[in-house]
């Protein structure tokens, strides 16, 4: 049955190319709407709440826990080389360059991206999008744009908060728990961080991941098959696709931004 | 066989009222499965037209085509003798929809907005009215469909009958020429069916709007329809209710299966 | 409408908190804009700065009082280091500067050792007494040489 396997592989690859094309076209429609139509600030504020604010608790908690673990792992390793004074730099750089934007993107995908896909999918099922079309209201302008924009705006903010919580978690371990030098923790971090390469790159990543998760989740919901199975498939596909896309783009941004 | 009154193909129908929407030779496949093989029928101006058919016969599909939500594979849908819906560009579709209201099966009200905001949406989007004028307009429409004290409720908090009324109200606020109703009686108890039915008849008489209703509810259809379009096996049979009462076509017989009084 | 107003407030707080976090990362950690507000600029020249980099800390007695602005070569091909330190710290004119390493493999920094003069260093002054960085490889190289010579 090798033929079946090859056929499936081919079908999967074709599917992927189609998806990529569909996503790109959808992104162009959203961008076009962004360019041509005024923002709906009321809807944007509401979506900032459901996407940004409601993701806050999990992002802050995860940031703190990741910081604690990094502090512990970093300390036990650095102490072997007598370099425990650089703990702040180690924890901070790892968070700023990689874990902050990447983990935030993955968390937001799970918390808000899946919810966005499910919500838009449910609107497809209950004909709410068709209802908008019949009222000559563009669903991309009315539904998709505020959600996507709120996601893109929230991601860098959430990522920054994640990093600050993580640095705080590392500080808790390195300074409070094991009694390190409080000044050295921060000063080692301050002297190690460079603005353009580290902070700029971190922001760029958070922004790009925000765009990816926003487009994938809204597109999956928008193109959802109009039944319950379709909604669940759209939700799953959003999480899988967003996570993989985040990690792929993470590699390329890291490589091209010259960390 | 007495096919004189039931028309199974296109033709100069409607001697009394002129035909508002003329459907000609629609073909449509969903995947491999043919939905419409050759559907031709006409919908009468300012009357209640009911599309009947078993489940899967394409009632909703035809209705969606009338709303430009779906395009047939071939065929023509002419409105007012000149506008062919199957050939419209996106801006022409928008212009056409300004004159069309649609009441969806589940209501299709936006569930994040209150009932009032839902009904106000088309006015806020497209009319130059200010908030006070919009509120007056909504009040008026809500009164005419019997909606009271539900302004601030979310659609999820409405009962089935109320939801249908709210959907009807939203479809009516823009004062459309054509009103499309998808299964307005589905999921309602018999008393509420009567209520919604009389509401539709009332709206039709007062506003003189061309209604196209997709329904499987035979009894109400024969009470209110000015014209019935029966979808069977990918084709359409249309005529006045009386023509269906004196049916002779075995396909009609099969569909009603003795339901006719 | 009350619910919506509350929501707006929470969204506003969220955006403010996020921006504050971004500002902290950019300004305190990233060093954007520090050293502009009334910082005291001091210059020191070294033969060898080793792995010293811009933004490395400047300390007195282990307490950070500023950071390195720029490192460049002067006309005599010596390394010219411009530091930005807090003007609140009174440093005598005979203060000396040494480049040290935190730990064996740690980052390099400049330690200032205050002298005994009455006069204080002013903005743009040069520190005359400097001690260059100790480069580990050279030190080890010298040691091996000396060991070889003594045999």
Image (cartoon, rainbow, N blue to C red):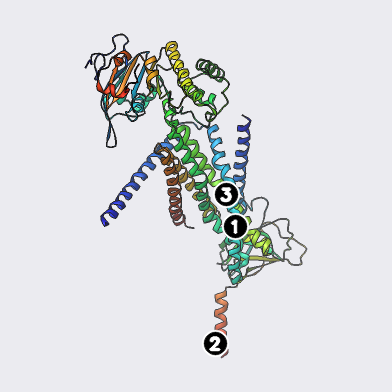
Question: Marks 3 and 2, how far apart in space?
Answer: 60 Å
Point 63% across, 65% down: residue = A85
Name the residue that disc number 2 marks.
Answer: C148
Name the residue that disc number 3 marks.
Answer: A59
Residue nearest the viewer, comparing C133 with B10: B10
- Residue B67 lies, in percent from the top left, at 37, 24
Q: Chain of mark 2?
A: C
> In the displayed structure, would residue B249 be above or below residue A247?
above
Residue B206 is at least partly visible in this image: yes
Q: Left or right? Give the position of B128 relative to A92.
A: left
Asked which secondary structure carries label 2, the reply is helix
Of the numbered discs 1 and 3, the one sitting upstream in the chain is 3
Asked which secondary structure carries label 3, the reply is helix
**Quarter containing the N terminus of chain A:** bottom left
Name the residue that disc number 1 marks.
Answer: A67
Q: Left or right? Give the position of C84 relative to A252.
A: right
């Amino acid at each position: 049955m090798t033929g079946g396997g090859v056929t499936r592989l081919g079908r999967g690859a074709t599917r992927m190319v189609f998806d990529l094309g569909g996503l790109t076209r959808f992104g162009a429609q959203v961008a076009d709407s962004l360019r041509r139509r005024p923002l709906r600030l009321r809807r944007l504020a509401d979506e900032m709440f459901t996407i940004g604010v409601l993701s806050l608790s999990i992002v802050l908690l995860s940031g703190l826990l990741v910081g604690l673990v990094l502090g512990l792992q970093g300390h036990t390793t650095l102490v072997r080389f007598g370099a425990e004074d650089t703990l702040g730099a180690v924890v901070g750089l790892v968070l700023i360059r990689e874990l902050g934007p990447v983990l935030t993107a993955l968390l937001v995908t799970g918390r808000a991206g899946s919810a966005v896909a499910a919500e838009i999918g449910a609107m497809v099922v209950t004909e709410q999008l068709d209802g908008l079309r019949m009222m000559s209201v563009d669903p991309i302008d009315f539904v998709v744009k505020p959600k996507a924009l709120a996601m893109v705006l929230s991601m860098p903010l959430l990522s920054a908060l994640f990093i600050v919580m993580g640095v705080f978690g590392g500080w808790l371990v390195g300074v409070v728990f094991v009694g390190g030098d409080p000044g050295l923790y921060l000063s080692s971090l301050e002297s190690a961080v460079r603005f353009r390469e580290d902070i700029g790159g971190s922001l760029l990543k958070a922004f790009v991941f925000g765009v990816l998760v926003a487009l994938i989740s809204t597109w999956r919901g928008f193109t959802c098959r109009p039944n319950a199975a379709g909604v669940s498939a759209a939700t799953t596909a959003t999480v899988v696709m967003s996570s993989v896309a985040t990690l792929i783009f993470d590699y390329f941004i890291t490589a091209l931004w010259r960390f | 066989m007495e096919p004189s009154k039931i028309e199974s193909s296109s033709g100069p129908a409607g001697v009394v009222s002129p035909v508002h929407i003329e459907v000609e030779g629609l073909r449509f496949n969903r995947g491999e499965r043919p939905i419409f093989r050759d559907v031709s029928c006409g919908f009468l101006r300012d009357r209640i037209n009911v599309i009947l058919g078993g489940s899967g016969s394409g009632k909703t599909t035809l209705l969606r085509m009338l709303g430009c939500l779906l395009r047939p594979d071939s065929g023509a849908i002419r409105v007012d003798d000149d506008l062919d819906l199957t050939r419209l560009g996106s801006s022409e579709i928008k212009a056409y929809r300004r004159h069309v209201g649609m009441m969806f099966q589940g209501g299709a009200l936006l569930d994040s907005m209150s009932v009032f905001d839902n009904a106000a949406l088309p006015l806020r989007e497209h009319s130059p009215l200010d908030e006070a004028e919009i509120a007056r307009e909504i009040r008026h429409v809500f009164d005419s469909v019997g909606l009271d004290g539900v302004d601030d409720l979310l659609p999820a908090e409405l009962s089935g009958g109320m939801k249908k009324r709210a959907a009807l109200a939203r479809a009516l606020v823009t004062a459309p020429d054509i009103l499309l109703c998808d299964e307005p009686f589905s999921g309602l108890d018999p008393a509420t069916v009567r209520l919604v039915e009389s509401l539709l008849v009332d709206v039709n008489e007062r506003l003189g709007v061309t209604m196209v209703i997709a329904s499987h509810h035979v009894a109400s259809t024969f009470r209110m329809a000015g014209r019935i379009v029966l979808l069977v096996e990918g084709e359409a049979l249309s005529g006045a209710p009386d023509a269906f009462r004196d049916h002779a076509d075995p396909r009609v017989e099969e569909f009603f299966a003795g339901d006719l009084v | 409408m009350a619910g919506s107003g509350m929501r707006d407030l929470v969204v506003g707080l969220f955006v403010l908190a996020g921006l504050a976090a971004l500002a902290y990362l950019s300004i305190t950690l990233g060093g954007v804009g520090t050293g502009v507000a009334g910082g005291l600029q001091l210059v020191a020249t070294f033969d060898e700065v080793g792995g010293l980099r811009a933004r490395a800390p400047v300390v007195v007695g282990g307490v950070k009082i500023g950071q390195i602005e720029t490192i460049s070569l002067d006309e005599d091909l010596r390394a010219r280091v411009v530091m930005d330190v807090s003007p609140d710290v009174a440093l005598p004119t005979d203060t000396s500067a040494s480049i040290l390493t935190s730990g064996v493999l740690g980052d390099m920094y400049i330690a200032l050792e205050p002298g005994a003069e009455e006069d204080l260093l002013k903005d743009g002054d040069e520190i005359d007494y400097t001690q260059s960085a100790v480069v580990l490889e050279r030190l080890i190289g010298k040691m091996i040489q000396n060991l070889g010579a003594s045999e």
